[in-house]
Amino acid sequence: MFAFLLAFGLLRYLADDWVRVNTTPVLPLACTLAVVYLLGTLWEGRFARGHTPLNPLSSAPWWLVAVTVLWIGLVFYSPDFVWLLFPLVFLFLHLLSRGMGLMAVVVLWAVAAFGPALLHPEGWGISAVIGPLIGAVFAVAAYYTYRALHSEARHHQQVAEQLRTTREELALSEHQAGRLEERERLSREIHDTVAQGLSSILLVSRAAANSLRQGDAAVTFQQLETIEGAAGDNLAEARRFVRDLAAPSLAADLPTALREVIRRVEDRQQALGKAPLISLQLAGDVHRELPETVATAVVRACQEALTNVVKHAAADTVVVTLAVWDLELTLDVFDDGAGFDPATVGTNSYGLQGLSRRLAALSGHLTIESEPGEGTVLAIQIPLTSARSSQKEI
């Protein structure tokens, strides 16, 4: 725009006063103004592209003064150069502070409006005042409108960048939470299956070694069969982890799965020579089809309860009671063993903590009632109306 207006003013001046072209400095002033303006824009462009380390803003005031002085000289020789006021307004508003820029615009307008009147009063009129005023006001309005739009665009860009960063952080947080949840789930599964089985193998193998030292071949053979069965069960559990982490014992209905758990515990304890009498009692619609997560939680609860009984209770009788009603499922495991204080043991047992978290995910809860010397009752309750019980994997 600056180049076009400069060239247009020069052509009009040459067309109107070709005779005086050699007697006035208009042509040298116009050429000098073009060179100075071009040098400034080239310097700015090279700095913006990183081709020079010299910041043009350090010399911008001097460059702006040179451009303005040359323009004023052209205006005093010919009113054809008045319209360069329009691009100059943008320069002053951009390079100076708001107050200084507006004051400079007023001065530029006064020069453009009243400067030609000093040398060319015969051609000066009210239009020479109003025309530059309209151009200056329009330039100021256009400049600040652009600045407002630019600021708004930058604001939206920053908000979009913040949203993108927040979305990435949220995705990373959810990924990490999923990893921790999966790690905890696998930890519970391993504790409830493979770890308990390996513990059984270790205990029975020690008992078999003692029987072998005493020369009791029949007992040793029975214990070795128990070790073989436990090892086979644990191998199946390990393969299950690799395959799909679905409980294999739940291929049948829930009562059958509980009987299998009881059988394994009885076989192990018989091999150790201290098997309690374990019975299973059923109530309600126990053959009702249940969500896999609910059935898995019941089986794991039974495993954990019986493991704790044979490890710590020294019980003679254990009664497992499963009840399935319309709105809830309950499992009670009673033993007549030594008992304990639930307030202290419950907080230190990893198995009970994991079982409690498993039940909480199904909106269920775990209750333990025990007194030293009076046995223990472990009871779980799971509502069968919970939507999460059929959706969330434990």
Image (cartoon, rainbow, N blue to C red):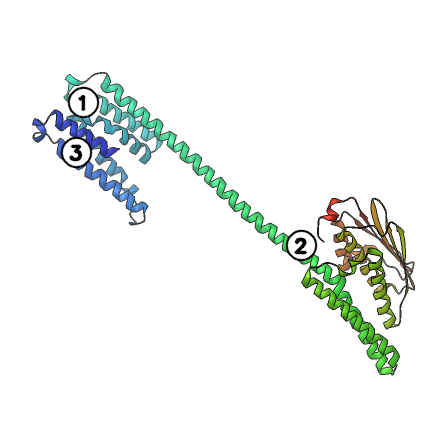
Along the horizontal axis of the image, is 116 left or right of 177?
Answer: left
Q: Is residue 49 above or below residue 146?
A: below
N-terminal of the pair, mark 3 or mark 2, is 3
Name the secondary structure under disc 1: helix
- First in residue order: circle 2 vs circle 1: 1
**What amino acid is labelled 1 in the image?**
Pro
Cα separation, mark 3 vs mark 1, equals 17 Å
Viewer-closest of 298 and 245: 245
* Label pair 2/1, CB-CB below 8 angstroms: no
Quarter of the figure with residue 1: top left
Q: Residues within 10 Å of mark 1 (few under 14, many from 20)?
A: many
Q: Quadrant of the C terminus?
A: bottom right
Q: Position of residue 205 (x, y in %)?
A: 80, 75
Residue at the spot x=32%, y=49% of the render?
50
Query: Dot 2: few (<14), some (14–19), or many (≥20) neighbours within 10 Å?
Result: few
Residue underneath mark 3: 30
Residue occupying the point 24% across, 27% down? 83
Residue 34, by quadrant, is top left
How crowded pointer 3 is (Cα within 10 Å; few <14, some 14-19, many 20+) is rated as many
- Name the spot of residue 155 as percent of width and height, x first: 46, 37
Q: Nearer the viewer, mark 3 or mark 2?
A: 2
Query: Residue at coordinates 83% horizontally, 46% vertically from top-left?
Result: 328
| Residue holding disc 2 | 181
What kind of element bears circle 2?
A: helix
User: Which residue is denoted by mark 1 in the rendering?
Assistant: 116
Nearer to the camera, 36 or 220: 220
What secondary structure is marked by label 3? helix
Which of disc 1 and disc 3 is earlier in sequence?
A: 3
C-alpha gap between disc 2 and disc 1: 82 Å
